[in-house]
Image: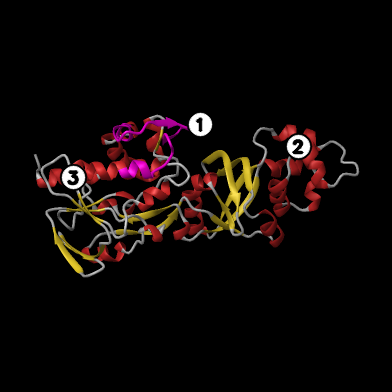
Amino acid sequence: MAAEVLSKHPVQIDVYEAKPSLGRKFLMAGKSGLNITHSENFEQFVTRYGNRKEEIQKWLLNFTPNDLRNWVHELGFETFVGTSGRVFPKGMKASPLLRAWINRLSEAGVRFHVRHKLVSLNGLSCRFETEKEIQEVKSHAVILALGGGSWKSLGSTGEWVEMLKPLGVKVEALKPANCGFDAQWSNHFREKYHGHPIKSVTLSFESFHQQGEFIITKEGVEGGLIYSASAMMRDEIEKNGKATMYLDLAPDLTKEKLIEKLSKPRGSRSLSSYVEKTIGMKGAKMGLLYEVLSKDDFTNAEKLASFIKRLPIELIAARPIDEAISTAGGVSFESLDKNLMLKNVSGVFCAGEMLDWEAPTGGYLLSACFASGVAAGNGVVNFLEIK
């Protein structure tokens, strides 16, 4: 995106990529449908960036979610808004969009160099490891967009952290974001319900309350609803060694209605068949109740209703960083000027996920990555005083 901004000016642009092909993480983002951005109003949109809202709002004002949609349209692809408000290109795939983009940049004179891995940075001099040799490249400006620390196989190795520290750049430790968590399941629950979805529940954690779904794993939990609350739950685990999320397993029924239904005589039916017949709860949701409640709890309608409306699930660890969709941490905003240039290394700019911010899934990650590329490209224009 930074190259695109600069391609409209009289400068030579070279893009160096460590992998044999371009945009591998972009393609992975589109594997189950390329969620390019979100259609919600701008004021709500910027709240998704938490304590980095003010910094990222500046990028997004210069390249808004609507600008991103128009950019996709200019490349020849229509977009549509899904039922959840998420925005996708028609056809859903990332690869046609990426091909069209690379072709347009190539026609504008941008040169691409694959299998060039950055191994050191000395001011405006970059050293790349290629299949044949170590190559040194000197430039008038450098933009680093080296990714976070998840999806190492796609190129986001996080190795750049040690490269920047000697230059006096403050880097916050990389941490998993949009990640799953470990829970202490019983062996029976783990084996029986691994891979099962938990649908139509409300997750509450501190100020977070949202309805959605997630998946039970052998280790614990993962999926969209979990990812949405993951930053808060990860930070709580870091602080106190555990985090307790609360699930409303029946968001469409009040506690009073549940008590009324569960007060009916059970007769000869088993607990499971009674609860299923009375309130329609079965499968993995019932399994979750059995993980937390005693048999006596099931015989007390008020107690059972209370747990159904607010079931505590203790989480003990975030999943490893390479399993995460994205990462938090990275180059501190204190180390950057308003143009995203490193204060300690004149002419070197940073963009994308390598900066210290995070966002939930839903198009927010890609939107801010694109906008940061625009910001860094414009930063170089200012720095080089290009007309």
| Disc 1 target residue | 83
Residue shown at the point (48%, 44%) measured from the top left? 32
Judging by the rendered image, the residue that carries numbered circle 3 is 379
Instruction: Note whether 121 is above or below 109 in the view shown.
Output: below
13 sits left or right of 234 in the view: left
Q: Amino acid at mark 1?
A: Thr
User: Badge 3: few (under 14), some or many (20 or more) residues near its Cα, within 10 Å?
Assistant: many
Q: Are marks 3 and 1 in contact (CB under 8 Å)?
A: no
Q: Is residue 108 left or right of residue 182?
A: left
Q: Secondary structure at mark 2?
A: helix
Report, in whole angstroms, how far the alpha carbon at label 2 lies from the one at label 3.
59 Å
Residue at image location 69% in from the left, 33% down from the top:
253
The stretch of residues the image draws in magenta is 70-99
Q: Which mark is residue 279?
A: 2
Query: Callout 1: 10 Å neighbours few (<14), some, many (20+)?
Result: few
Are the residues flagged by discs 2 and 3 in contact, CB closer than 8 Å?
no
Which of the image's four quarters has the C terminus?
top left
Q: Nearer the viewer, residue 335 or 164?
A: 164
